[in-house]
Image (cartoon, grey):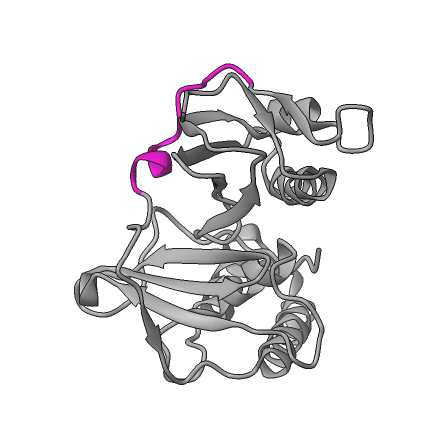
Amino acid sequence: MTVPVQSLLFADPREAADLAAFLGRLLHYDRAAAVRLQAGGGDALAVFGRPPSFEVLAIRAARLAGPATLDVTVSAGELLESLDPDGASGAGGALPAPVTGPPWTGVLPPRGPWHEEAGLPRPDALRTALDLAVAEFRTRDEALPDDRRTRAERDRIGREIWSRQVGVTGLPLRAVHAAQSLGFLRPAPDFPVSLLSAGGAGGWLRLRTPFGSIALRRDPVGGLGGPGGLTLSVGRG
């Protein structure tokens, strides 16, 4: 029997530890981050977050010890504190009180159908593209004269670099940067990564790896939109 949950009990402590690592990375970019938790009656928990530096949605899945029904938005910091993956209760934690979610929590990717897209470079090529982008930003930033080294000018350079498409996929480089910074894109020769789409031209793109997904909306004319501006981020967490 599936019942609503008041606490989280994971299939094993590693699930809690991996989720804690994800929450810690989110909090690195936003100390007041919120996450939306969803479980639809099975043992899979989906955790959605939005690191503001990247203008994307990050999705991390965790296996619960049993079936659960859950849909709630909570503080990422309070959830991280409740998990305590290194303590005696490492396989679980109390569910924090709900919070009023930011606007993004009401606009999540669809459950499906998702279709695989061709043209995504190999993971090693993606990491090389990130290294080159970071190096380019630093070079251009250092070349700015003192009277132009402003936050607005540095953000403009960052927006230009991270908005570039990955090959012919339509995926912006900032989505790959988010995957790397959140621990989803890892160095391994056979690391599987794929690009999926849903909803057509005005729908979603999703970069999927075994450790999580990065999703973002496409606008109706085929571009990739996000609410507000893209804040510069060159961290390699």
Q: Quadrant of residue 42?
A: top left
Residue found 75% across the figure and 30% down from its top: 90
Task: From the viewer's side, name the closer residue of 49 and 148.
Answer: 49
Residue 141 against residue 109 in the figure, above or below: below
Residue 171 image offset from top left, x and y in percent: 40, 71
Q: Give the percent coordinates (x, y) of residue 181.
A: 64, 57
Going 23% across and 61% down the picture, which residue do you hit?
219
Q: Is residue 40 left or right of residue 30?
A: left
Residue 149 percent coordinates (x, y): 61, 59
Q: Residue furthest front?
A: 1
- Start and end of the magenta stretch? 96-107
Position of the C terminus by quadrant: bottom right
Check residue 99 for magenta coloring. yes
Q: Nearer the viewer, residue 161 or 191?
A: 191
Quadrant where the N terminus is found in the figure? top left
Q: Position of residue 158 (x, y in %)?
A: 53, 63
Q: Is residue 67 left or right of residue 118?
A: right
Residue at 68% x, 67% y is: 186
Magenta stretch prevailing secondary structure? loop
Q: Residue sitting at 45 percent across and 65 percent down?
A: 207
| Vertical arrangement, residue 108 with respect to residue 80, above or below | below
